[in-house]
Each structure stands twice: as structure tokens, then as C-alpha cells.
Amino acid sequence: MNKFDEYQRLQRYKFGYYAMLLTVILNIINFFVVELYGFQWAETPRIEPLIIILIVTVFFTISLVYSGAYFAKRESVLVLGIVFLLTGGVSIRTALLFPLFENGQVTMWMTNFIVGINFLAIPATYLVRISVDKLRDVKEKKEA
């Protein structure tokens, strides 16, 4: 295993740990909000943990892409980026055909919306990462 693969593996473990902690914390908060205050924020109790897991998935995905641990060396980022853009666009478009909120509660269609956000976040985060790297390189050249 080369150094880049080892770096990616360690980054994935690190952000996986953070994602697990975030999942636990958000579920504990949700438990107290629902059980102590009787506030159900989703149309069914089954949707609440699903929404929480999807939100954590978006965090995990963005963290991996920005840290450089998402794509393998041999993957075509351009092709995957186009596929992710199309998939995210279709998912969000489908979600927007239906109400995301009803009676002040999140509906099941919010899951499609968040999945779409996750797919769109991958190429967007990658572009931000490339831009930041280029700006950092320019700054280092000016200082040298």
C-alpha cells in the first residue's frame, strides 16, 4: 500500500468516527426533543432517524471529498462528477414535485432532496478543493 492509499484510509477512519459521533449526538438530541417536549418534526417517527443519517452522510461525503480521501487515484473525477450532477439533479427535481413540508413537519420527500444535495455536493466540494489548492499554490509562489 502506498502513502496516498494509507492517507486516504486514515482520513476515512477519522471522518467515519466523526460521523458516528455526530449520528449519536443528533439521535440523542432528537430523542429528548421528541420524548421530553413531544415535538415530532417529521410526519412519522421512522423518518426522523433516516433524515439524521442522511444529514450525517452529507457531512461525511463532503469531509472525504475535501480531504482528498473520496476518489481513488485511478477514478475519472470528471466522469463521476457529471454522473453525480445528473443523479443529484434528478433526485432534487423528483423531491420538488412533492411537498417537502406538510403541517409543519418534514415529509418523506425530504429524503430525496437530501440525497440529491449529497450527490451535488461531491463535485461542488471537489471544485472548491481544487480552487483552494490553486490559490494556496499561487500564494506560496509569491512568498517564495
Image (cartoon, rainbow, N blue to C red):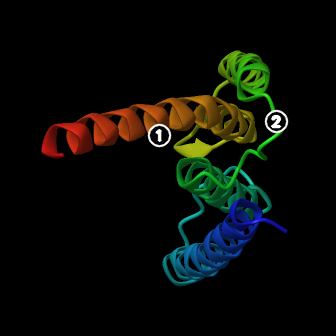
Tag 2 near tag 1, CB within 8 Å: no
**Residue at the disc numbered 1:** 129
Is 32 located above or below residue 117 in the figure?
Answer: below
Classify the position of the N terminus by image quarter.
bottom right
Specify the quadrant of the image occupied by residue 46.
bottom right
Q: Residue drawn 77% across and 44% down?
A: 73
Q: Position of residue 91 (x, y in %)?
A: 75, 24
Give me the disc on residue 140: none
Q: Position of residue 57 (x, y in %)?
A: 68, 55
When the figure is inspected, residue 129 is found, relative to residue 41, above or below; the finding is above
Q: Residue at x 44, y 34 (%)?
A: 128
At label 2, the amino acid type is Glu
Name which residue lies at 78% across and 20% down. 79
- The residue tagged 2 is 75
Mark 1 falls on what kind of element?
helix
Q: From the top left corner, tell me how far across and down residue 19 is, in percent.
A: 63, 70
- Give how far across and how far down residue 55 sits, in percent: 61, 54
The span from disc 2 to disc 1 (Cα, nearest Å) is: 17 Å
Say what secondary structure mark 2 lies in.
loop
**Vertically, is 132 above or below 25?**
above
Q: Nearer the viewer, residue 129 or 24?
A: 129
Mark 1: which amino acid? Arg
Q: Quadrant of residue 93?
A: top right
Q: Is residue 124 left or right of residue 138?
A: right
Query: In this rendering, is residue 24 above or below 141?
Result: below
Residue at 56% x, 40% y is 103
| 54 to the left or right of 131 | right
Q: Residues within 10 Å of mark 2 (few under 14, many from 20)?
A: few
Instruction: Tell me which corner region of the image, top left, top right, bottom left or bottom right, holds residue 122.
Output: top right
Question: Which one is in front, 144 or 56?
Answer: 144
In the orientation shown, which residue stands out farthest toward the left? 143
